[in-house]
Image (cartoon, helix red, strand yellow):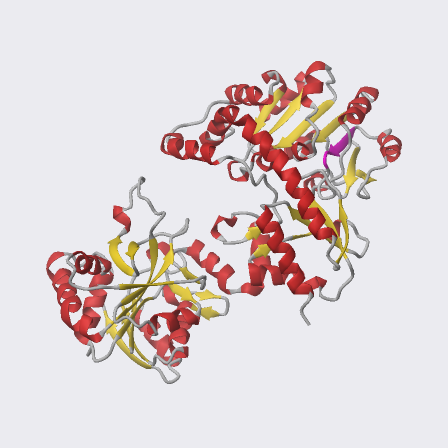
């Protein structure tokens, strides 16, 4: 079998990385893209390789020759690489080389496991394409399949906003073609089309014509979980690094601290409501998306009014935030030279913005006497209720009485997880009882399951504080999608309430499963949509997080550093029951290894 690699293109989408370097020479891990492709072919016994060059041809050619290692390279140059596309490059190759064997066609922007090549070269079919079930984030040509045969090839320009991807497959752009197929219909039509009709299109067009005319049959070889990645732009390069450099996965995720839609992981680190928004709510957003992205959002006064409808409070008392973190710089500036009391441990942003704070201990349980004693000399007392990562919860009655008894102090209550506690927000109480020294802060992203659209709010009965916040916020402080979400959520209160109850039930089941594991010392009963777990001392503990991420793409949160007692703690987000169960089984497998 002879391999043909198409590598003539400029790599425009990869700029600026390709301004002086050929796209295939960019590295993922410690290997260049082309090196990975060649090694994959070589591992499967393919040593006769044709490379179509164009942009930076001499650089690529010399790179390959310096590493030939028993490979028989043939180079075909496409001098018109700037104005032509891969149909022209492939036509050049087919007309310059002798097709005396079956052809394995590989595009040069692919990274894959070696066994993927094994799958295609060992197919029993003369002509076949490697396919994967379409998933969100894939782009490029897709196909329809019936009874193991490709029935339609759909290029990107035919995939409009109403296109149904649900039953489609993505081409990997790796094909096996028989010698007879190449020498007969394919080469003839490919050459004619590239020379006479259009040399700036894709060769898949020719395959589509042959299939449509029923001149040829191309079989589908569908992947079964094998890993691969298409590298079109710098973002793809980062995704490929995550997929194929398993030892760096944790470092990559910690560096980005979000943006995980590009990574196929199960995230037990970041916390959100797994049962909301409902499918009907997402459908309504999807149906209105085109209109939303083309329109500006409303000003802050309107945002506050819409939010107040949802919170059932006076709009003068609330400010919608672009995520609760928007308030932190304002709080930092307002209390810069004041004395502040924080729980320890707690959410890391509080000790970050209040660097000279004093602390009251949350030993997975809070001694209110310590708060009373230390709070006497403080101007601002912070309660994260339930606290993160411990899950400790203080009753609203205590917080209300503490605030009422200390009117000279500002009491900040972060209620980001309260809906999973079985209790209610303080807002209802504060609407009835005017306590101007209380500030309630909440991240709605966690509660509503939409961290991607950045929603939060700050509530206060102090008109001076509210004016300060409004003066600090920009005229357009949110996006249209977030605003629309707040509008339509009024129709979904029942499903939201049910999502809280279901999460509480799931937390109890998950905690019970964790509690009986012999590698776990203690599971702490918490009131958030997460569970804090203390592990027994074990020499394997240090490798648990990396192993889960490398072997199962499962991301967990090590919070041991927050306790400083030499023990190992993990905070697990409460996800769907099947995911929670699978995590327990994966940890069992890890700790049972020799």
Residue 198 appears left or right of 5: left
- The N terminus: image quadrant: bottom left
Instruction: Identify whether 296 is placed above or below 538.
Output: above
Q: Is residue 467 visible?
A: no
In the rendered image of this protein, does residue 147 appear above or below residue 318? below
Magenta part of the chain: 380-386
Residue 345, by quadrant, is top right
In-image side of 378 versus 543 (left or right): right
- Residue 352 at what x, y percent from top left? 70, 42
Q: Which one is nearer the viewer's eye here, 540 or 375? A: 540
Q: Residue at x 32, y 44 (%)?
A: 164
What is the quadrant of the C terminus in the image?
Answer: bottom right
Q: Quadrant of residue 396?
A: top right
Q: Position of residue 162 (x, y in %)?
A: 31, 39
The reply to whether residue 410 is in sight is yes
Give the x, y percent position of residue 508. 69, 43
Total marks shown come to 0
Residue 366 or residue 552, whichever sits in front: 552
**In the depicted view, which residue is nearer to us: 72 or 183?**
183
Residue 111 x, y percent position in the rendering = 41, 65
Q: Main secondary structure of the magenta part?
A: strand
Q: Is residue 151 magenta?
A: no
Instruction: Let me know if residue 381 is in the magenta part.
Output: yes
């Amino acid at each position: 079998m002879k391999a043909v690699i198409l590598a003539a293109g400029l790599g425009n989408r990869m700029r600026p990385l390709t301004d002086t370097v050929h796209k295939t020479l960019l590295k993922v891990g410690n290997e260049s893209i082309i090196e990975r492709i060649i090694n994959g072919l070589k591992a499967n016994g393919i040593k006769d390789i044709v490379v179509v060059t164009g942009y930076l041809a001499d650089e690529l050619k010399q790179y390959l020759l310096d590493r030939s290692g028993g490979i028989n390279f043939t180079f075909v140059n496409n001098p018109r690489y700037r104005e032509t596309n891969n149909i022209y490059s492939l036509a050049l190759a087919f007309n310059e080389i002798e097709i005396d064997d079956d052809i394995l066609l590989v595009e040069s922007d692919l990274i894959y496991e070696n066994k993927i090549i094994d799958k295609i070269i060992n197919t029993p079919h003369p002509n076949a394409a490697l396919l994967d079930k379409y998933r969100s984030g894939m782009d490029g040509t897709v196909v329809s399949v019936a009874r193991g045969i490709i029935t339609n090839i759909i290029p990107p320009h035919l995939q409009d906003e109403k296109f149904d991807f649900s039953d489609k497959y993505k081409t990997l752009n790796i094909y096996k073609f028989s010698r007879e197929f190449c020498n007969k219909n394919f080469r003839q039509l490919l050459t004619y089309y590239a020379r006479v009709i259009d040399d700036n299109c894709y060769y898949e067009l020719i395959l589509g014509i042959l299939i449509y005319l029923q001149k040829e049959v191309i079989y589908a070889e569908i992947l079964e979980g094998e890993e691969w990645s298409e590298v079109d732009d710098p973002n793809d390069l980062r995704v490929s690094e995550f997929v194929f450099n398993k030892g760096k996965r944790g470092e990559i995720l910690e560096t980005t601290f979000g943006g995980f839609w590009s990574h196929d992981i199960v995230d037990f680190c970041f916390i959100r409501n797994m049962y909301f928004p409902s499918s009907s709510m997402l459908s309504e957003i999807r149906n209105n998306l085109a209109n939303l992205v083309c329109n500006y959002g409303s000003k802050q006064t309107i945002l506050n009014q819409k939010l107040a409808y949802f919170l059932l409070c006076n709009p003068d008392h609330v400010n919608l935030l672009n995520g609760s973190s928007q308030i932190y710089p304002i709080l930092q500036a307002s209390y810069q030279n004041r004395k502040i009391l924080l729980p320890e441990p707690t959410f890391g942003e509080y000790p970050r913005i209040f660097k000279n704070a004093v602390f009251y201990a949350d030993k997975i349980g809070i001694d209110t006497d310590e708060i009373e004693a230390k709070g006497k000399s403080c101007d601002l007392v912070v309660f994260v209720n339930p606290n993160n990562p411990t899950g400790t919860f203080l009753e609203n009655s205590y917080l209300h009485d503490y605030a009422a008894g200390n009117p000279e102090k500002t009491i900040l209550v972060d209620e980001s997880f309260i809906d999973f506690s079985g209790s209610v927000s303080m807002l209802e109480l504060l609407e009835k009882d005017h306590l101007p020294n209380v500030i309630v802060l909440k991240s709605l992203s966690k509660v509503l399951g939409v961290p991607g659209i950045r929603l939060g709010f700050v509530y206060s009965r102090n008109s001076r504080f509210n004016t300060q916040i409004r003066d600090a916020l920009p005229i357009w402080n949110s996006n249209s999608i977030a605003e629309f979400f707040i509008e339509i959520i009024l129709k979904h209160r029942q499903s939201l309430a049910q999502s809280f109850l279901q999460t509480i039930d799931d937390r109890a089941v998950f905690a019970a499963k964790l509690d009986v594991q012999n590698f776990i010392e203690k599971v702490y009963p918490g009131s958030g949509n997460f569970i804090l777990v203390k592990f027994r001392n074990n020499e394997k503990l240090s490798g648990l997080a990396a192993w889960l991420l490398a072997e199962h793409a499962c991301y967990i949160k090590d919070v041991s550093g927050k306790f400083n007692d030499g023990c190992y703690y993990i905070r697990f987000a409460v996800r769907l029951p099947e995911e929670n169960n699978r995590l327990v089984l994966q940890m069992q497998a890890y700790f049972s290894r020799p």
